[in-house]
Image (spheres, helix red, strand yellow):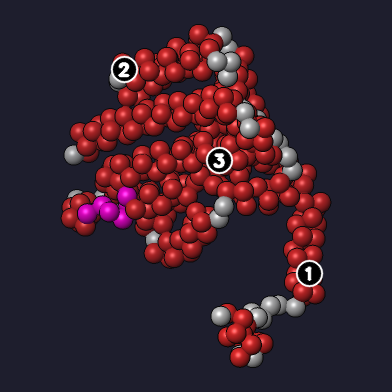
Amino acid sequence: MASFICDALPRALCRFPEIDSGLMRSFRQTVDNGFKTFVRSYGDVLDTLTRPLQWFLNGLQDLFTDSPWLLVVLALAAIVFALGRSVKTSLGTALALMAIGAVGLWEDTMVTLAMVTVCTLFAIVIGIPLGIWMGRSERAQSVFNPVLDVMQTLPSFVYLIPVVMIFGIGKVPGLIAVVIYAVAPIIRLTNLGIRLVSREALEAADAFGSSPWQKLFHVQLPLALPNIMAGINQTIMMSLAMVVVASMIGVGGLGKNVLQAITNQFFTVGFLNGFALVAIAIIFDRASQAYGRRLQKHMEVVHG
């Protein structure tokens, strides 16, 4: 039927008009050569700028992997308790970490934990100020919204291409790719939280003569805190998901094992490493949510 319709219509209507292949080839070569020229010209500068990231990541990773396992378990359980004030969550954290160590995934889990921690910290440092800016400026929102739309719809593998072309293979390129992939939720939800603050609360702050900074820190941020903590939570989950993909460019850890399990069809290896990733995700999720609730109550008491 389709061929009959095409026979009856002009050829130009049946075959989509494509850009000339020579023009497309020239365009691709121009873009690729531009990337290569940029890397050759500024590669040393980029290495210098990213060196502190390498030191920070390596230092945290060495701290996790070289410390006695019992000390790490107790320290992480104590941190979770300090954040959530929940004995059950702290005990669950300790048991999950010991189960991970029992199946031989302790060192890989510590590498992944260090990577996710550093990625989350940098995403918070970048995302919350941008979200506040968007929440307080219509122009900033109109500029960043299309960028965030593209970032959240691009396949995760696509992020690796420019990062590898510019920075090469290694942990820092993987860290940069993870941060770029995972930063969008915290920006969006911070922006949303700032914009959901009621007009009455802002008018009351203005009536008391609050400056813009006082209004931000004493009214908008405390009321936007549930959204901000939800953004941090989503950023952590997306960082964990992207760590598996970033293992293709040398990140290592549990993601490397999952990738090898997929390649070699090792069901048990994939399942155990997936269990370790899920355990880390649950620990981060429970701790961040509990801390967000406590922090919100504290701010309501202080500022309310």
- Dot 3, crowdedness within 10 Å: few (<14), some or many (≥20)? many
Mark 2 residue element:
helix
Image point (37%, 56%), residue name: 135
Asked whether the residues under the numbered discs 1 and 3 touch, taking CB atoms below 8 Å apart as contact, a structural biologist would say no
Q: Is residue 57 visible?
A: no
Q: Residue at x 79, y 70 (%)?
A: 26
**Location of residue 229 in the rendering, given as x and y in whole percent from the top left corner:** 36, 39
197 relative to 235, above or below: below
Which one is in front, 110 or 101? Answer: 101
Q: Which residue is mark 1?
A: 25
Q: Which mark is residue 88?
A: 2
Badge 3 element: helix
Type of residue at label 1?
Arg
Q: Which residues are magenta?
A: 193-198
Residue 172, position as x, y percentages in the image: 66, 37
Marker count (numbered): 3
